Amino acid sequence: MILYLDQGNTALKWRLCSSAACAGVEGRDDDDALMNLHRALSNIGHRSVDEVWLANVAGVEKLDQLTVALQKICKNTIRPLSVERHLAGVTPAYKDLSSLGVDRWLTMLAAHQDYVGASLIISLGTALTVDLLDASGRHLGGLIAPGWQIVKSTLQHRVADIVAQPSVLNFAGLGASTEDCVQNGASFMVLSFIERAIEQFGGIASTTILCGGDAVQVAGFVNADVVVRETLVLDGICVARRAYLEAADKNKKGF
């Protein structure tokens, strides 16, 4: 049993696979107890996993906590991933690879694996990120902006008398209360950023991909053809695992 983990800034997404195939049982957990993961393992008749491949953007402390929790279900090495200069045909644009989020790199691996031609990858999570990948796998650069939750919460914390409301993206139009105006305004900012990015860079790309936690909610409002791949990071972890194992096999054979 193989476990792929995407530890973001707000939640942990995971996928359990019975073989080297990328498809499997998916879920998420919001704390280190990993109750949903344990429940999923039990439902498929397992108490442990053979491999763990992990992408973490939540910092060293979170990685340490997660590693302790994972050691209860995996006795083998837990493999935290880091950005490589060349892997699976992808070459990042950054000179300092340590400053490129591993989640962004993994979405590039998955996009390059699954789509012919250039790809524009837009991730909608805690941050909004844009990355452009040419047909050869060369990363042409990207953008980072505050995500919807950050825009909304910043305004609520900085402006008096704005009451926090349930977090739902809303593109209905004009609000009839301050709270609705904040929620709708933040939603429009996200949508405008996405459509501007597509307008400016989408012409280069054969495929525009929306991924991340808010991708499904936003996709229907984007005035462009997009592909929704909510768990593209997990797909990228699978691609990375395969590339590492293929490289190790070649080294054993003396290639």
Image (cartoon, grey):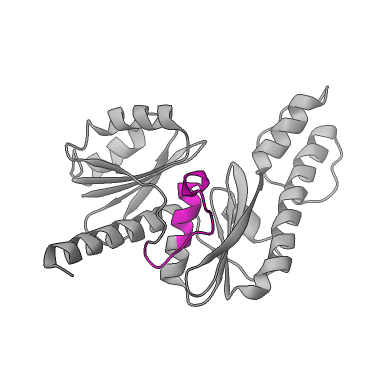
Residue at the extreme left:
253
- Give coordinates of residue 96: x percent, y percent: 51, 48
Residue 33 falls in which quadrant of the image? top left
- Give coordinates of residue 209: x percent, y percent: 56, 64
- Give coordinates of residue 166: x percent, y percent: 66, 34
Q: Please name the residue shown 20% across and 43% down the image.
A: 49
Residue at the extreme top:
160
The residue closer to the viewer here, 131 or 171, is 131
Quadrant location of the C terminus?
Answer: bottom left
Is residue 204 visible in the rendered image? The answer is yes
- Residue 178 placement, left or right of 156: right
Task: Identify the magenta region.
Answer: 87-108
- Residue 185 placement, left or right of 169: right
Is residue 33 visible in the rendered image? The answer is no
8, above or below 61, in the image: below
- Residue 44 placement, left or right of 33: left
- Give coordinates of residue 89: x percent, y percent: 40, 68
The residue closer to the viewer here, 48 or 97, is 97
Q: Please name the residue shown 67% across and 67% down the image.
A: 201
Does the stretch in magenta take in 107?
yes
191, above or below 49, in the image: below
Q: Please name the residue shown 21% across and 58% down the image.
A: 19
